[in-house]
Structures are given as structure tokens and as C-alpha cells.
Image (cartoon, coloured by chain):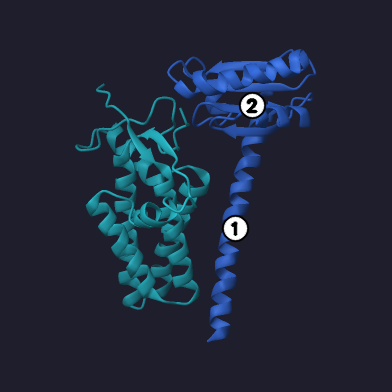
Amino acid sequence: MADIILWRLALAVGLMAGGVGLYWLSNRWLLRRAHNSIGDLLPNHSRTPVLVYFTTPTCVPCKTVQRPAIEKVRGMLGETFQIVEIDATERPDLARRWGVMSVPTTFVLDAQGNARYVNNGVARADKLLKQIQAV
Amino acid sequence: MTTYALQKVDHSALKTNQIMIILFNTIGFILNVPWLAVLVAVVMGLGALLKVPGFGFLYKYVLKPWGWVKPDVLDDNPEPHRFAQFLGFVFMTAGSIALFLGAAVLGWSLVWLVSVLAALNAFGGFCVGCAVYYWLGRIKVPGFIKQPPAGTFPGMRPSRS
């Protein structure tokens, strides 16, 4: 009886670990996809970290939270990083290529153009600051 | 296209429901107790009938008053979440019936499917049942009238405004 319970417990843990692994892989895939799309977005990449910010004109949290957060980070870090803002309604091709499913979505790219972080939904100023400083 | 006003939806209540579903289903599987799957099916069915998250009473009467879980109220449509719960109820009922008919693999697979989708919603912010609801709305199925909140991919959790 105990053997069966242990076996089922191991199976449940294995399935859960598989789920976590899949989630991690999907996040990696999103970042890799962003990396492969960097050329379309920044043909003249200036070798500084880049914050890619997907928004739409009707997105309320973009205006009320995300934009002020980005401006706050810009105020703190100055011109040490580049901001690329993309209207997903004007450039649905880019949104699709970058795997953007909701706005706001922000990507933080390092100086080599590698996508290092992705934030689905609102990313607060402190979080963005940490991510940009880390790349 | 008609636009409908969004309502205040407490996503903490939804999350509590999803986590309880995962918990009961997992314990039921590990201990091989199909009655726990039946319990989840009944609670989800009652929730769908009463238009509330099935295990939401735990959040409303215990977790929220005691301050263990804070409200997370977002502008959203409640209907897709109700539909998602109803879909979960259907799968849980099918799984429970299969378990009691001796089809353990099929039964537990259906139970696990519900748990995986609940986990995807609770931890990944993507509600598959809601996406199905919006998709049915797009192909003009009567009754599926709500549109996803502006700037939100159908089924994804809306951003905090």
C-alpha cells in the first residue's frame, strides 16, 4: 500500500516538475525568439542595453503605470540604455514575432542584443531598474 | 461591434479556487481516493450554478478576513471565468465517472488535465476556458458576447489598471 502511494507521489512530483520545466522552456523560447528578431527592430544597434516596450493606444495600465515607470527608470539611468516603444496595433507582425500576447510587455536586452528578461504585464520601476542594471 | 463594460473581478478568489482544485486533485491521485475528484466536481458544479468560484468561500470567509490573501481586483469579464469553471466541472465529472467505472488511467488523466489547466491559470495567468469562451464569441456562437479587455490576449490575465 505504502509502495503504491510512494509511486503515485513520485509520479505526481514528476508531472509537476515537468510542468515547471515546460514553463521555463517556454520562457526561454520567448527570449530566444526575441533575440532572433532583434535585427528587424534595431538594424543599427548601438551596443547599449535596450528596453523594448510593447503597448497599444487603448491600454490604460500602459499609460498610468508602465510609461511612468519607464520614465522613472530613464530619469535614474539617463542615456545608458535605449528605449524602443512599439504600438502592437500598428506593428502586429512584430508583436507576433516577439510572441507578445498582452500589453504592456517589456523585454530587456543586453548590450549584445540578447533578450535577457521578459515581463508579461506591468513591470514596476524597481524591477526594470534591477533588470537593466543586471545586463 | 458592441462593447460591454468590464466588471470588478477579484482574481484572488479565482486563484484560491484554482489552487484548491490542484490540491484536492493531487491528494486524491496520490492516495488513490476518487471521492476527492467527485468532491471537486461537485464544488465546481455548485460554483458554476451559483456563478461564484467553487472554493471561493474559503477565500471569502477565511483567507481574506484573516488577511492571509489580499484582494486582487481587476477590470475583467466574469463570464469567461464562469464558463471555464463549467468546463472544468464537465471534465471532472467525466473523470470521476471513469474512475468509478474502473477506467483509472482515463479518469486520472482527465483529473490531471483539469489540474494542469488550473495551474496554468493560477501561475501562468492564462485561462484556457476563457480563451475558448472568447473564441466561441468570435465565431458568433449565441451567448458568448463578451470581448477580452482592451490590449489583452484572449484568455490572458488583464493587467492591473
Q: How many marks?
A: 2
Q: Which residue appears at 60% of the width and 58% of the height?
A: A18
Front position among marks 2 and 1:
2
Q: CA distance from mark 2 to mark 1?
A: 33 Å
Quarter of the image holding residue B148? Answer: top left
Chain letter of disc 1 in the image:
A
Q: Mark 1 = which residue?
A: A18
Would residue B74 be seen by someone viewing this image from the given angle? yes
Q: Which residue appears at 56% of the width and 23% of the height?
A: A66
Q: Earlier in the sequence, mark 2 or mark 1?
A: 1
Observer-nearest residue: B34 or A79? A79
- Chain that the image shows in cyan: B
Q: Secondary structure at mark 1?
A: helix
Colour used to depict chain A in the structure image: blue
Q: Mark 2 = which residue?
A: A125
Check residue A42 in the rendering and tell me which mark sits there, or answer none: none
